[in-house]
Image: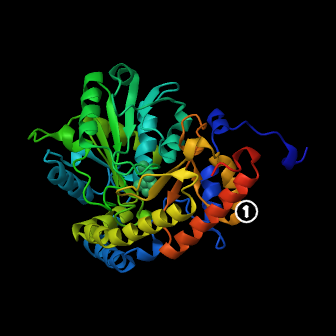
Amino acid sequence: MTSSNRSRPERAQWLRSSNDITQQFLAFGGRPDVVSLAGGLPAAELYPIEAVKQATRRALERHGSAALEYGAVEGFPPLRDLIAARISAETGGTFTAANVLLTTGSMQALDLLGKALIDPGDLIVAQAPTYLGALDAWRPRAPSYRKLDWQSPDRTLLAKAKFAYAVPNYSNPTGVLVSQERRAALLDAVRDAGTWLVEDDPYLTMQLDGPPGPSILAHAAGRSRAAYDGPVIYLGTVSKSLVPGLRVGWAVGDPEMIRTLTLTKQATDLSSSMFAQSVAFELMRAGVDQEHSASIVPVYRERRDALCSEATRHLKDWFEWDVPSGGMFVWMRSRDGAIDTDELYKFAVEEKVAFVPSSVFDFDGKDRTAMRVNFTRSSPEVIGEGVRRLGRAIEAYVSSRPQLKGRV
Ligand SMILES: Cc1ncc(COP(=O)(O)O)c(C=O)c1O
């Protein structure tokens, strides 16, 4: 028997329910002849490269070997202090380093939460459609899902759940901004039910039409002088306010939960990069993230408006959408569900334009009635070209479906 035909052990069960769809989108969207409206990527040409260069030098000069060590599992101490101070100022509550765990992007915080809280079959009550990275992160833990009802959160259901998951600011994929009333109502329900609420907030700084108002964490922290120990576990990141390549994120929560997540992280990677965290610290201490966010918002606003006005010209017979007040995406819903977006995607590939079909944001993979369209990555001209290609893809799709012809 040669080594090539020897049988090898089976891969773990969970991989059977996984897929490489994200990699496919990224690979297709990365081709130079393709207009990608698929990824959730910021505009690379706007990255503050000079500021990162200076902060890197400062990090090495000021922190020396501490920036190059394995470091504490919880993360680079000055950055934990800085996050705690900022969150205290933003929420009015009392947060210390004991409330903060630094992670490799907020994606790792999602993974750690899955490892720390979910046994197979456990229930997650999630805002739906749901961020596909969260579904990916939790898939190996084999949870079950139920949809979070913002209108009237179901306390009985929440009492059975390990946690609720929500992205109240400019959700991925829908761009929805959740009202303050709904935030408060969800927090009440979560408190009554005695469960956790994971508030994932990567788009906080991408406020295209003004501030979104307090986070759910702020509602939970109140004006208490006592150290925060509430049910909200808040996730933040520098991926949108600075650059995604630093891979610096944080989980803020009850100190007991932070200890549990730290233990979980120790078994995952010992610690995240002290180097990256010390650079992020120097950037944030100098307020570069705030300045940078303020400078990119007008550019993104123009791109959102370009996408929506071009879409009104070419897509509105078949799709409808709400103009998002922040974030990176427009969620386009097929009118009367007439178009199957998994199928449309094949026509889009022919036209060399990419979007993300709704099925990958659905717990069951069944919703094929919508698509996520990104407006941050490309210039208004490229976005316009992408939308025109999408329009042609829809025409080709519709002509291949006799039952749809003549509908418009
Ligand atoms: C809702 C949501 N959570 C988490 C993440 C992961 O972000 P990070 O780069 O901090 O890992 C993203 C990335 O786009 C996201 O959209």
Q: What residue is pinned by disc 1?
A: 350
**Most foreground residue, 334 or 90:** 334
Whether disc 1's CB lies below 8 Å from ligand 1 is answered no
Is 340 displayed left or right of 370 in the figure? right
- The image quarter containing residue 59 is bottom left
Whether residue 65 is visible: no
Residue pictured at 23% horizontal, 59% vertical:
78
Residue 198: % across, % down: 35, 39
Visual colour scheme: rainbow
Seen at 56% across and 36% down, the residue is 140
Which element is circle 1 on?
Answer: helix
User: Badge 1 local density, few (<14 within 10 Å), some, or many (20+)?
Assistant: some
Mark yes or no: residue 331 visible: yes
Residue found at the far left of this picture: 225
4 relative to 187, above or below = below
Asked if residue 209 lies left or right of residue 149, the reply is left
Residue drawn at the location 72% of the way across and 36% of the way down:
10
Q: Quadrant of residue 189?
A: top left
Viewer-proximal residue among 282 and 318: 318
- Above or below, comparing residue 156 to residue 281 in the picture: above
Picture coordinates of residue 163, whole percent (x, y): 38, 31
Residue 373 in picture, x, y percent from top left: 52, 57
Residue for point 43% across, 63% down:
244
Residue 222, horizontal then vertical, whole percent? 14, 40
Quadrant containing the N terminus in the rendered view: top right
Residue at the farthest top position: 156
The residue type indicated by label 1 comes to: Glu
